[in-house]
Image (cartoon, grey):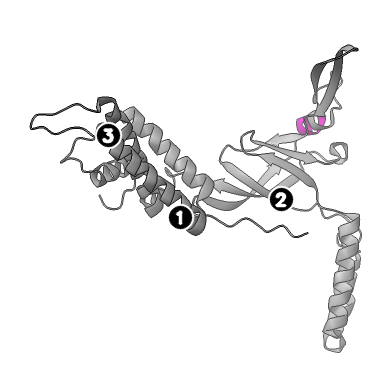
Amino acid sequence: MAKPTTRQELVDYCLRQLGAPVLEINVDDDQIDDLVDDAIQYFNERHFDGVERMYLKYQISDDDIKRASGSGTDGVGIVTTTGTANVSGVGTITSNFYENSNFIQVPDSVVGIERIFKFDTSSISGGMFSIKYQLFLNDLYYFNSVELLQYTMTKRYLEDIDFLLTTDKQIRFNKRQNRLYLDIDWKAQSKDTFLVIDCFRALDPENFTKVFNDSFLKRYLTLLIKRQWGLNMMKFSGTRLPGGIELNGRQYYEDAERELADIKQRMSLEYELPPLDFIG
Protein backbone atom coordinates (compact mmCIF):
# COMPACT_ATOMS: atom_id res chain seq x y z
CA MET A 1 0.00 0.00 0.00
CA ALA A 2 1.11 3.59 -0.63
CA LYS A 3 0.93 4.42 3.08
CA PRO A 4 2.71 1.61 4.93
CA THR A 5 1.83 1.21 8.59
CA THR A 6 3.84 -1.92 9.40
CA ARG A 7 7.38 -3.14 8.88
CA GLN A 8 6.37 -5.63 6.16
CA GLU A 9 4.27 -3.05 4.31
CA LEU A 10 7.28 -0.74 4.25
CA VAL A 11 9.46 -3.52 2.80
CA ASP A 12 6.83 -4.35 0.16
CA TYR A 13 6.60 -0.68 -0.79
CA CYS A 14 10.37 -0.40 -1.27
CA LEU A 15 10.51 -3.59 -3.35
CA ARG A 16 7.76 -2.28 -5.61
CA GLN A 17 9.76 0.92 -6.11
CA LEU A 18 12.63 -1.25 -7.37
CA GLY A 19 10.43 -3.12 -9.86
CA ALA A 20 8.88 -6.02 -7.97
CA PRO A 21 6.96 -8.14 -8.81
CA VAL A 22 7.80 -7.46 -12.47
CA LEU A 23 11.48 -7.86 -11.67
CA GLU A 24 13.00 -10.33 -9.24
CA ILE A 25 14.86 -8.46 -6.52
CA ASN A 26 17.80 -10.69 -5.59
CA VAL A 27 18.05 -9.71 -1.92
CA ASP A 28 17.57 -12.20 0.91
CA ASP A 29 14.91 -11.60 3.56
CA ASP A 30 17.55 -11.56 6.32
CA GLN A 31 19.49 -8.90 4.42
CA ILE A 32 16.34 -6.80 4.11
CA ASP A 33 15.64 -7.14 7.85
CA ASP A 34 19.15 -5.85 8.58
CA LEU A 35 18.64 -2.92 6.20
CA VAL A 36 15.31 -2.00 7.81
CA ASP A 37 17.01 -1.91 11.22
CA ASP A 38 19.83 0.25 9.81
CA ALA A 39 17.37 2.65 8.18
CA ILE A 40 15.30 3.08 11.34
CA GLN A 41 18.43 3.60 13.44
CA TYR A 42 19.67 6.30 11.05
CA PHE A 43 16.21 7.89 11.08
CA ASN A 44 16.13 7.95 14.90
CA GLU A 45 19.62 9.37 15.25
CA ARG A 46 19.58 12.04 12.54
CA HIS A 47 16.01 13.00 11.55
CA PHE A 48 14.25 15.63 13.69
CA ASP A 49 11.01 13.62 13.40
CA GLY A 50 12.77 10.48 14.62
CA VAL A 51 12.82 11.56 18.26
CA GLU A 52 10.47 13.12 20.78
CA ARG A 53 11.32 15.41 23.66
CA MET A 54 10.41 13.81 26.97
CA TYR A 55 10.54 14.57 30.69
CA LEU A 56 11.34 11.33 32.46
CA LYS A 57 11.17 10.97 36.23
CA TYR A 58 13.58 8.83 38.21
CA GLN A 59 13.30 8.05 41.91
CA ILE A 60 16.62 7.85 43.74
CA SER A 61 16.97 4.68 45.79
CA ASP A 62 19.16 3.88 48.74
CA ASP A 63 21.21 1.55 46.55
CA ASP A 64 21.88 4.43 44.11
CA ILE A 65 23.26 6.59 46.91
CA LYS A 66 25.49 3.84 48.29
CA ARG A 67 26.81 2.83 44.90
CA ALA A 68 27.42 6.36 43.61
CA SER A 69 29.04 7.66 46.80
CA GLY A 70 31.07 4.52 47.41
CA SER A 71 29.89 4.46 51.01
CA GLY A 72 29.34 0.70 51.13
CA THR A 73 31.48 -1.25 53.57
CA ASP A 74 32.72 -3.53 50.79
CA GLY A 75 33.80 -0.69 48.51
CA VAL A 76 30.71 -0.88 46.34
CA GLY A 77 30.73 1.88 43.73
CA ILE A 78 34.50 2.14 43.39
CA VAL A 79 35.89 0.97 40.05
CA THR A 80 39.65 0.45 39.84
CA THR A 81 41.56 0.55 36.56
CA THR A 82 45.20 -0.51 36.50
CA GLY A 83 47.54 0.87 33.88
CA THR A 84 51.12 -0.21 33.16
CA ALA A 85 53.83 1.39 31.04
CA ASN A 86 57.44 0.56 30.26
CA VAL A 87 59.74 3.55 30.83
CA SER A 88 63.30 3.43 29.55
CA GLY A 89 65.79 3.24 32.38
CA VAL A 90 63.06 2.87 34.99
CA GLY A 91 61.20 -0.28 34.12
CA THR A 92 57.52 -1.03 34.44
CA ILE A 93 55.38 1.59 36.18
CA THR A 94 51.99 0.57 37.50
CA SER A 95 49.27 3.14 38.22
CA ASN A 96 45.83 2.70 39.73
CA PHE A 97 42.90 4.91 38.79
CA TYR A 98 39.66 5.04 40.76
CA GLU A 99 36.21 6.04 39.56
CA ASN A 100 32.91 6.23 41.42
CA SER A 101 29.90 4.54 39.83
CA ASN A 102 27.95 7.79 40.08
CA PHE A 103 25.48 7.03 37.33
CA ILE A 104 21.91 5.91 36.83
CA GLN A 105 20.84 3.55 34.07
CA VAL A 106 18.56 5.14 31.48
CA PRO A 107 16.32 3.37 28.93
CA ASP A 108 17.91 2.26 25.67
CA SER A 109 15.50 4.46 23.70
CA VAL A 110 17.02 7.66 25.14
CA VAL A 111 19.38 9.13 22.53
CA GLY A 112 20.24 12.45 24.16
CA ILE A 113 19.91 14.28 27.47
CA GLU A 114 19.69 18.05 27.71
CA ARG A 115 19.72 18.62 31.46
CA ILE A 116 18.48 17.66 34.88
CA PHE A 117 16.01 20.12 36.30
CA LYS A 118 17.61 22.21 38.97
CA PHE A 119 17.51 21.21 42.64
CA ASP A 120 15.98 24.50 43.75
CA THR A 121 16.56 24.65 47.50
CA SER A 122 18.36 27.97 47.92
CA SER A 123 17.16 30.65 50.33
CA ILE A 124 16.85 33.03 47.41
CA SER A 125 14.29 31.14 45.37
CA GLY A 126 13.07 28.20 47.43
CA GLY A 127 10.45 28.07 50.16
CA MET A 128 7.85 30.42 51.59
CA PHE A 129 10.43 32.66 53.27
CA SER A 130 12.65 33.02 50.22
CA ILE A 131 13.56 36.42 48.81
CA LYS A 132 11.71 35.64 45.58
CA TYR A 133 8.50 34.80 47.43
CA GLN A 134 8.69 37.91 49.61
CA LEU A 135 9.39 40.08 46.58
CA PHE A 136 6.22 38.86 44.88
CA LEU A 137 4.22 39.08 48.10
CA ASN A 138 5.14 42.68 48.87
CA ASP A 139 5.54 44.22 45.42
CA LEU A 140 2.75 42.75 43.36
CA TYR A 141 0.10 44.28 45.63
CA TYR A 142 1.41 47.69 44.53
CA PHE A 143 2.19 46.54 41.03
CA ASN A 144 0.89 49.70 39.36
CA SER A 145 3.33 51.78 41.36
CA VAL A 146 6.36 49.60 40.55
CA GLU A 147 8.50 50.51 37.56
CA LEU A 148 8.92 47.50 35.31
CA LEU A 149 12.55 48.35 34.57
CA GLN A 150 13.47 48.44 38.25
CA TYR A 151 11.51 45.25 38.91
CA THR A 152 13.23 43.48 35.99
CA MET A 153 16.69 44.57 37.13
CA THR A 154 15.96 43.34 40.66
CA LYS A 155 14.79 39.98 39.35
CA ARG A 156 17.89 39.67 37.17
CA TYR A 157 20.12 40.50 40.12
CA LEU A 158 18.48 37.80 42.25
CA GLU A 159 18.81 35.28 39.41
CA ASP A 160 22.55 36.04 39.15
CA ILE A 161 23.00 35.45 42.87
CA ASP A 162 20.97 32.26 42.63
CA PHE A 163 23.15 31.06 39.73
CA LEU A 164 26.33 31.63 41.72
CA LEU A 165 25.06 29.92 44.86
CA THR A 166 23.16 26.99 43.33
CA THR A 167 24.72 26.19 39.98
CA ASP A 168 23.30 23.60 37.63
CA LYS A 169 24.37 20.04 38.29
CA GLN A 170 27.05 18.69 35.97
CA ILE A 171 26.00 15.66 33.93
CA ARG A 172 27.66 13.36 31.41
CA PHE A 173 25.87 11.06 29.01
CA ASN A 174 26.80 8.74 26.15
CA LYS A 175 23.99 6.93 24.34
CA ARG A 176 26.17 3.87 23.73
CA GLN A 177 26.50 3.34 27.48
CA ASN A 178 22.93 4.15 28.56
CA ARG A 179 24.43 5.75 31.65
CA LEU A 180 23.66 9.21 33.00
CA TYR A 181 26.55 10.33 35.19
CA LEU A 182 25.61 12.85 37.89
CA ASP A 183 28.61 14.70 39.32
CA ILE A 184 26.95 15.70 42.56
CA ASP A 185 27.42 15.08 46.25
CA TRP A 186 25.52 11.81 46.46
CA LYS A 187 25.88 11.60 50.23
CA ALA A 188 23.80 14.78 50.48
CA GLN A 189 20.94 13.26 48.47
CA SER A 190 17.84 11.81 50.07
CA LYS A 191 16.21 8.49 49.34
CA ASP A 192 13.01 8.62 47.20
CA THR A 193 13.91 12.04 45.77
CA PHE A 194 12.72 12.42 42.19
CA LEU A 195 14.93 13.56 39.33
CA VAL A 196 13.30 15.07 36.25
CA ILE A 197 15.36 14.40 33.12
CA ASP A 198 14.94 16.56 30.03
CA CYS A 199 15.82 14.18 27.20
CA PHE A 200 15.17 13.04 23.65
CA ARG A 201 13.71 9.56 23.09
CA ALA A 202 13.73 7.62 19.83
CA LEU A 203 10.31 6.95 18.34
CA ASP A 204 9.38 3.28 18.29
CA PRO A 205 7.75 2.52 14.91
CA GLU A 206 5.74 -0.31 16.45
CA ASN A 207 3.97 2.22 18.69
CA PHE A 208 3.99 5.17 16.28
CA THR A 209 3.21 3.52 12.94
CA LYS A 210 3.38 6.78 10.96
CA VAL A 211 7.16 6.40 11.09
CA PHE A 212 6.87 3.67 8.45
CA ASN A 213 5.23 6.19 6.11
CA ASP A 214 7.89 8.88 6.48
CA SER A 215 8.98 10.07 3.04
CA PHE A 216 12.68 10.12 3.94
CA LEU A 217 12.64 6.65 5.51
CA LYS A 218 10.86 5.11 2.51
CA ARG A 219 13.33 6.63 0.05
CA TYR A 220 16.36 5.82 2.19
CA LEU A 221 15.40 2.17 2.70
CA THR A 222 14.68 1.77 -1.02
CA LEU A 223 18.20 2.93 -1.84
CA LEU A 224 19.73 0.65 0.79
CA ILE A 225 17.97 -2.36 -0.75
CA LYS A 226 19.02 -1.20 -4.23
CA ARG A 227 22.66 -1.00 -3.14
CA GLN A 228 22.48 -4.48 -1.58
CA TRP A 229 20.85 -5.79 -4.76
CA GLY A 230 23.69 -4.38 -6.84
CA LEU A 231 26.27 -5.79 -4.41
CA ASN A 232 24.72 -9.24 -4.70
CA MET A 233 24.55 -9.05 -8.49
CA MET A 234 28.19 -7.98 -8.74
CA LYS A 235 29.10 -11.59 -7.91
CA PHE A 236 27.67 -12.55 -11.33
CA SER A 237 29.35 -9.83 -13.40
CA GLY A 238 29.96 -11.00 -16.95
CA THR A 239 27.29 -13.70 -16.80
CA ARG A 240 25.15 -13.74 -19.93
CA LEU A 241 21.48 -14.64 -19.79
CA PRO A 242 19.47 -16.15 -22.65
CA GLY A 243 19.03 -13.54 -25.36
CA GLY A 244 22.47 -12.03 -24.84
CA ILE A 245 21.52 -9.94 -21.77
CA GLU A 246 24.47 -9.36 -19.46
CA LEU A 247 24.03 -8.71 -15.73
CA ASN A 248 25.47 -5.37 -14.61
CA GLY A 249 25.29 -5.33 -10.81
CA ARG A 250 28.05 -2.73 -10.51
CA GLN A 251 25.87 -0.14 -12.24
CA TYR A 252 23.07 -0.74 -9.73
CA TYR A 253 25.55 -0.46 -6.87
CA GLU A 254 27.19 2.76 -8.11
CA ASP A 255 23.83 4.39 -8.84
CA ALA A 256 22.61 3.55 -5.34
CA GLU A 257 25.81 4.87 -3.76
CA ARG A 258 25.46 8.17 -5.61
CA GLU A 259 21.80 8.53 -4.65
CA LEU A 260 22.54 7.64 -1.00
CA ALA A 261 25.22 10.33 -0.86
CA ASP A 262 22.69 12.83 -2.19
CA ILE A 263 19.95 11.89 0.28
CA LYS A 264 22.39 11.98 3.21
CA GLN A 265 23.36 15.50 2.19
CA ARG A 266 19.68 16.42 2.09
CA MET A 267 19.35 14.95 5.58
CA SER A 268 21.94 17.41 6.90
CA LEU A 269 20.36 20.37 5.11
CA GLU A 270 16.62 19.69 5.44
CA TYR A 271 15.83 17.06 8.08
CA GLU A 272 18.52 17.41 10.73
CA LEU A 273 18.50 19.99 13.52
CA PRO A 274 21.44 22.39 13.04
CA PRO A 275 24.22 22.28 15.65
CA LEU A 276 24.43 25.13 18.14
CA ASP A 277 27.07 27.75 17.39
CA PHE A 278 29.98 28.16 19.75
CA ILE A 279 30.84 31.77 20.55
CA GLY A 280 34.21 32.80 21.93
Residue behind mark 1: 266
Amino acid type, callout 2: Arg
Distance between mark 1 and mark 3 Cα atoms: 26 Å
Disc 1 marks a residue whose amino acid type is: Arg
Residue range in magenta is 62-66
Extreme residue in the left direction: 243
Per the image, label 2 sits on a secondary structure element best described as strand
Q: Is residue 115 visible?
A: yes
Q: Is residue 233 above or below residue 50?
A: above
Q: Pointer 2: what residue?
A: 115
Left or right of 54? Residue 148 is right
Nearer to the camera, 58 or 177: 177
Image quadrant where one finds the C terminus: bottom right
Nearer to us in this view, 154 or 27: 27
Q: Nearer the viewer, residue 57 or 101?
A: 101
Identity of the amino acid at label 3? Gly
Task: Give the spatial CA distance, label 1 vs label 2.
Answer: 29 Å
